[in-house]
Image: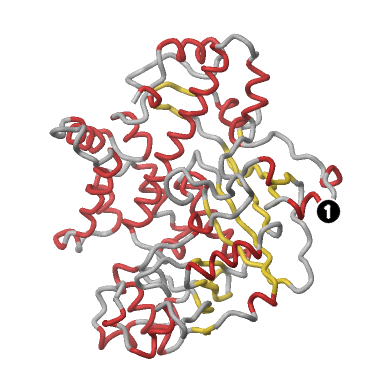
Amino acid sequence: MDDEILSPEECKILEDDGIILQSHNGKRKISKSYLSSSLAPSASPSNDEFSSHDKISRTATVQYHRTRALHEMEFPEQVRSLAALEFIGLNHETAKEIWNRWSSRPNPMDNPDDLMDFVYSHTCNLWRADWSAYTDEDALEKLGVAKWLQKAILDPRSRDIYLTGTLKGWLDDSLRTNFNSLVRIHKQLKAYAILRGNGKEQKQAILGKMEGENRHLPKPHVCITTAPPPILPGHEVFYKTKHPDGLGEGDDPFISEDGAINMRAVRTYPGGDFNPTNPAWYWTPEHETALAYKTYAEVRKPYSEVWIIRIQVPTTFISTLRKKELWYSYDWKAYAWHCRKQHDEDSIPERYHPYSTPGRTQTDLIIGHICKKDITVITKIPADKVQSTMNQDNILLIGDRKATQWVIMHRDVANRLGREIRGKMHIDVYKAEEDEK
């Protein structure tokens, strides 16, 4: 995989330009000024530079924020390497063990398992019955997670957000995103070295071209602003926190070349509060809730931007949806329990079938409270103990307010939503910046 390795010639170019330092144990330090400039534009143009028509004709407006210190990075020379496994958040001993198993696998040309598949297989130890007595801290330590990532995942400031998911879920999400960040930065470095190697462009010219490039936000379809557009009459506002290095699967961008919104990139996999066996699309009407998820994402993924996506949805569209409100109640506890256990239709009481089963009687939209009880705890509750075990303490609070979610339950409805919000989407991009001297 030559495209995943910086050649000696490319390394020399990057060294001469002061972007990377000399190699040490398969790692190189990267200039913080390069990282800071390559993540996002250094300045946003004035809103006055764009007409109202221009903003509406684009798929989304984008505003960049610099909110956190950029830490010094030791960057692996190869995307798939022992050093890469340490970079994403594993300690040396565990990284070495996984690397040795993957690199020595028999018949690698016929073995489809990628290096990260071996990582996810390793984190499956968290599901072992003989690990169930471990505290989260002990489990992460035994698993060989790096100290910095242990601290980030179990950050007490984000404890309530942590409880909306699982230890394995947050860990895999962190490792996956950090690996994708590595791939992205590696591609940027290689592209820079190739352009410089051609001898036709100077350093600053290349950096200017690369500044703020993001395959998920193609420039013809986004408008950079210094403030979000006003709320349109007859619209309701919803938010979702995402990170571009963790968006969707494969190479499909969030905004495609024709400006369409790829709703697959923002779906939630089965096992959420309200979707037992199919993907669903979760949004919140509360900006404060999105900010809480942003805070948790930043500490776990230090080299990925974090986005808060704001969409404006016409009330006329919402009025066409078949809705169900599911606030804290007998049904909220029961249905959330079935969903977290990923029960199929045969295991879920018939009165809940319209919630998640596609068809003429399907529920398009479920509105309700966010559950913060650890999934691994919920799934162990016996069916006859659900009502007595789950209580109001299991509702996510942001400040003193109960957090809520609006959940699009089916793909056809999500695709319709994607068409409705085109030109009415604003993305706040939060990035790390170089410390001021």
**In the displayed structure image, the side of residue 118 where residue 291 appears, left or right:** right
Circle 1: element type: helix
- Most foreground residue, 101 or 314: 314
Residue 57 placed where, x, y %? 75, 52
- At a point 48% along the width and 29% down the height, the residue shown is 187
- At a point 67% along the width and 58% down the height, the residue shown is 422
- Most foreground residue, 287 or 56: 56
- At a point 67% along the width and 19% down the height, the residue shown is 204
Residue 325 placed where, x, y %? 53, 84
**In the displayed structure image, the side of residue 194 where residue 373 appears, left or right:** left
Name the residue that disc number 1 marks. Answer: 52
Q: Split into 4 quadrants, where in the image is the N terminus?
A: top left
Q: Is residue 434 above or below residue 129?
A: above
Three-letter amino acid code at disc 1? Answer: Ser
| Among the 4 quarters of the image, the one containing residue 348 | bottom left
**In the displayed structure image, the side of residue 260 where residue 370 appears, left or right:** left
Scheme of image coloration: secondary structure
Residue 182 placed where, x, y %? 43, 34
Q: Is residue 179 above or below residue 391?
A: above
Q: Split into 4 quadrants, where in the image is the C terminus?
A: top right
